[in-house]
Image (cartoon, helix red, strand yellow):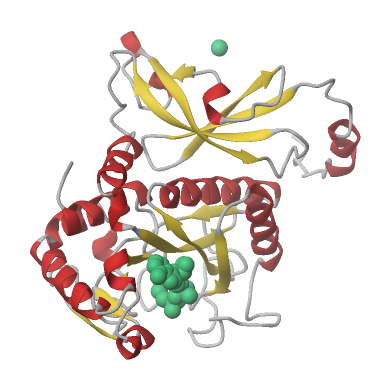
Amino acid sequence: MAESTTISNTENLLKYMSLDQRGHVQAEYIWIDAIGGVRTKTKTLFKAPTSVDELPEWNFDGSSTGQAPGDNSDVYLRPVAIFPDPFRQGDNILVLCETWDSDGSPNKYNYRHEAARLMETHAKEGFWFGLEQEYTLLGTDGWPYGWPRGGFPGSQGPYYCGVGTGKVYCRDIVEAHYRACLYAGIKISGINAEVMPSQWEYQVGPCQGIEMGDHLWLSRYLLHRVAEEFGVKISFDPKPIKGDWNGAGLHTNVSTNGTRGDGGMKVIEGYMKKLEARHNEHIAVYGEGNEERLTGRHETGSIDKFSYGVADRGGSIRIPRQVAKDGKGYFEDRRPASNACPYQITGIIVETLCGGI
Ligand code: ADP
Ligand code: MN
Ligand code: MN
Ligand code: MN
Ligand code: MN
């Protein structure tokens, strides 16, 4: 058999992508699956919607995604947010959806519904969040992109915020993703290359309430989708390479009207006591495989013990030096793993600091 070769069809594709759509809109319905991935399917609309309420509900075969049993497989897609589509462009849109079962209850993997209710109940607290999404780029063989096959690059040091050949990998994908996020209206606030080569970070925020989870999930979709075009895999594994290599987290920065106002440090100290009391409940929803990462080494705190401090990157929570100096601002929960669900993280933070629904 002839060896298969990869042919770039980009130029051919462009010819078709510029064909007139005759007034139709392509709506990419996006949902979160059972394993923290994203799935999508496309629907033709006959005119551009002006708000999310105008979009029809849809459904998918939940037995094919592990989200429903085969004998009752329809799962409903309820549109919750619209974004401009950077791939198809024009009037075409990305549609973020919640998943609902046929009996009218939220699907088991629909973590947004509960989070949105918590945000609504405690809206007057003025929650702002900022997430730092770390991730690793892998070749199709599953080994970090650009690493010697089956081997290792030189040890950590030159890579963090690195510049130059051999110090930084996949800048093209990172740049493409950054611009795609800006086009789509995602509140992406920055990027940096990470400590482990082929690991990167982008930040989203500050976002208010449920917008945090929506924007972060959309940014993850865009990252997978961009990397697909470059033939590279995205891993959100919190410890992709064992040993003396940094893991990947989803640092969660939090503030409220109370922490941002005068006397905010006192409010933050009160919050620390509440967070300490529910450390285990938080860890339970802060990502799979996080025990490999939260070892107390590589700029992490230990998974078994809550701690916090000013400018402390070896604790559960860091209060930035500037915040201590100003006496107000925000704090950084460093515990969440890169693969955690932002709806679950922000939801439990609101619940712990303010109480349930
Ligand atoms: P680090 O020093 O931990 O690497 P980054 O600059 O990567 O910090 O990320 C800081 C994050 O904090 C950003 O996502 C930003 O949006 C967020 N942030 C800044 N101010 C606030 C605030 N008042 N409330 C919540 N999040 C904030
Ligand atoms: Mn079919
Ligand atoms: Mn950061
Ligand atoms: Mn980082
Ligand atoms: Mn951080």
User: Going by the image, does 292 lie left or right of 185?
Assistant: left
Query: Which x, y percent locates residue 174?
Result: 64, 63
Give the quadrant of the C terminus: top left
Query: Which x, y percent locates residue 237?
Result: 40, 57
Q: Report which quarter residue 17 is drawn in.
A: top right
Give the quadrant of the N terminus: top right
Whether residue 302 is visible here, answered yes or no, is yes
Name of the residue lying farthest toward the bottom:
325
Whether residue 249 is visible here, answered yes or no, is no
User: Going by the image, does 300 lie left or right of 247?
Assistant: left
Query: Which x, y percent locates residue 11?
Result: 89, 42
User: Going by the image, does 71 lie left or right of 88?
Assistant: left
Name of the residue lying farthest toward the left:
277
Query: Which x, y percent locates residue 47?
Result: 72, 21
60 relative to 217, above or below: above
For the point 62% across and 68% down, which residue is it? 146
Q: Nearer the viewer, residue 247 or 312?
A: 312
62 relative to 194, above or below: above
24 relative to 318, above or below: above
